[in-house]
Amino acid sequence: MRRPAELLLDREGFLAWMIGLMVFLAALAIAAALAADGAAARWARSLAGTATVQVPADAANKLDALAAALRGVPGVRQARPIGLEETRALLEPWLGTELRDLPLPRLVDLELAPGADLAAIQKRAAEAVPGAVLDDHRGWADRLAGVATAIQAAAIVVVLLVAAAAALLIVFATRAGLEAQRSVVELLHLVGARDGWIARQVERQALLLALKGGTGGLFLAAAVIAATLWLSSGDRLRLLPQFEIAPAAWLSLVALPAAAGLVAMLTARIAVLRALRRLP
């Protein structure tokens, strides 16, 4: 005779496959949020304490004089004119090599001390070269932070939806199993089995199925995440930041199968007890 839990839960692995798929999706969502947050933080750190002054292309001959003038502003640690070839190399990933003959704005790279007076720097730059514009990269940093926050919010929504879908799946599977095996449940009641005992058998099987499926889904997600991180490294995708996940952040992914098992176990127990109360 089959165990009571096997009478109530899918023996063909349907639940394990579905829970594995849900853990896979949740892991990808969490990894995307972690990678986006890490990339935004690295970009913000790399931009901190730096700024650029952009001058019109026809003022290229004044670039050295501008850099010298800016070095005298309090808070400016270093002012380095960026050569034309270096400027072209910076823009080449975006504009390609076909636009190399265009008159490009010229840049002066600044290294700033904490608390540098940006207004004073802008004023000195405009005095040295009319039309010079200071860019402290604050807009970039704010946009990156906004994108990272949006991705994190989307990841939270995805994880919550996946958890809700898993819970509903367990509920429907349990109810269908109880209804299909009504005679077996009645027999168990006749021989003295209590609802709590039956619920424990089912929740244990639900936990095992969720751990089995969740572990498989996590391994598949880990392979996809590792491939994505490898593709984004180096110069393979020059227009995108390098995505990384801190070793400590991987713990949140490793915990997903256990979280799926807990959700499945609690949901199965509640569903079984409620369903059994409706049976004669």
Image (tube, rainbow, N blue to C red):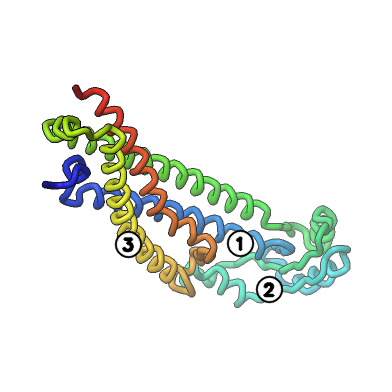
Question: Which quadrant of the view contains residue 126?
Answer: bottom right
- Separation of marks 1 and 3 at Cα, in angstroms: 29 Å
* Disc 3 target residue: 220
SS for tag 2?
strand
Q: Nearer the viewer, residue 112 or 124?
A: 112
Q: Which callout, 2 or 1, points to the residue nearer the camera?
A: 1
Q: Residues within 10 Å of mark 3 (few under 14, many from 20)?
A: some
Residue, disc 2: 82
**Which of disc 2 and disc 3 is earlier in sequence?**
2
Amino acid found under the numbered disc labelled 2: Ile
Circle nearer the viewer, 1 or 3:
3
SS for dot 3: helix
Comparing 38 with 268, the one in front is: 268
On the image, the x and y values in percent for residue 99 come to 50, 68
Check if mark 3's residue and mark 2's residue have beta carbons within 8 Å. Answer: no
The residue carrying mark 1 is 43
**Is 14 placed above or below 61 here?**
above
Q: Amino acid at mark 1?
A: Trp
Badges 2 and 1: C-beta atoms under 8 Å apart?
A: no
Q: Residue at x 32, y 48 (%)?
A: 207
Q: Would residue 176 be seen by someone viewing this image from the given angle? A: no
Specify the amino acid type for callout 3.
Leu
Name the foreground residue: 157 vs 183: 183
